[in-house]
Image (tube, grey):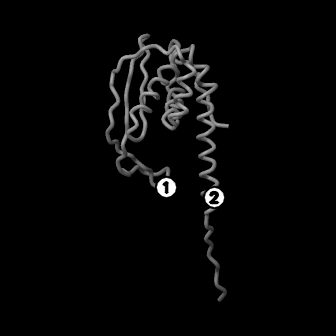
Amino acid sequence: MPNTTFDTAHDAGSPAPQARQRWLALLARATRDELDDALARCPDAPEFVWLRAPQTGLVLVQGRVGGSGDRFNLGETTLTRCTLRQRDGVVGTGYVLGRDAERAVRVARLDALMQMPQHHATLAAGPLAAIAQRVADAVEQAKTATAASRVEFFTMVREA
């Protein structure tokens, strides 16, 4: 079961940075339908103003040698980002790969709503748990597919 703990408190009711990182990572991987389903569970979401309207640009992607070694620059990818502030002062940020500005807006809205106690529990237990399960299942399928194609090499010692 994936780690879906999003409720670690930090500094007077605001979320712990690790919890926010986890839900933002999940929201960035969510489909538009999953994001719409989550937003539908919060019909009383406050109005907002843009701090940074959706923007699309390039970001540098880094890799690691062997997956855990030295860093190297892999290349660039397209990213869309935005930041909003709700009427109650809560700030939400959305980053998604690609050029889907509407998806980035939905992620920012949900980020802000996850920081509100009245919406946090509903979103964490329902839509975010479902997204976490889907992502975990996809990772497991990829591991299984990779393991099935694994080739074992061995060396035979010649007799003299």
Residue tagged 2: 147
Q: Earlier in the sequence, mark 2 or mark 1?
A: 1
Which residue is farthest bottom? 160
User: Which amino acid does the dot numbered 2 rest on?
Assistant: Ala
Quarter occupied by the N terminus: top right
Where on the picture, by quarter, is residue 99? top left
Residue at the spot 61% in from the left edge and 67% down from the top edge: 151
Residue at the spot 48% in from the left edge and 35% down from the top edge: 28
Residue at the spot 38% in from the left edge and 52% down from the top edge: 74
63 vs 89: above or below: below
Disc assigned to residue 66: 1
> In the image, residue 21 lies at what x, y percent?
50, 30
Numbered disc 2: secondary structure: helix
58 vs 21: above or below: below
* Side of 23 where 108 appears, left or right: left
> In the image, residue 45 lies at what x, y percent?
49, 15
> In the image, residue 113 lies at what x, y percent?
50, 19
Question: In the image, which is nearer the foreground, mark 2 or mark 1?
Answer: 2
> In the image, residue 89 lies at what x, y percent?
41, 12
43 vs 2: above or below: above
Numbered disc 1: secondary structure: helix
Disc assigned to residue 92: none
* Side of 99 where 30 appears, left or right: right
* Side of 88 where 13 appears, left or right: right
The residue nearer to you, when weighing 106 against 24, is 106
Mark 2 to mark 1: distance in Å?
Answer: 17 Å
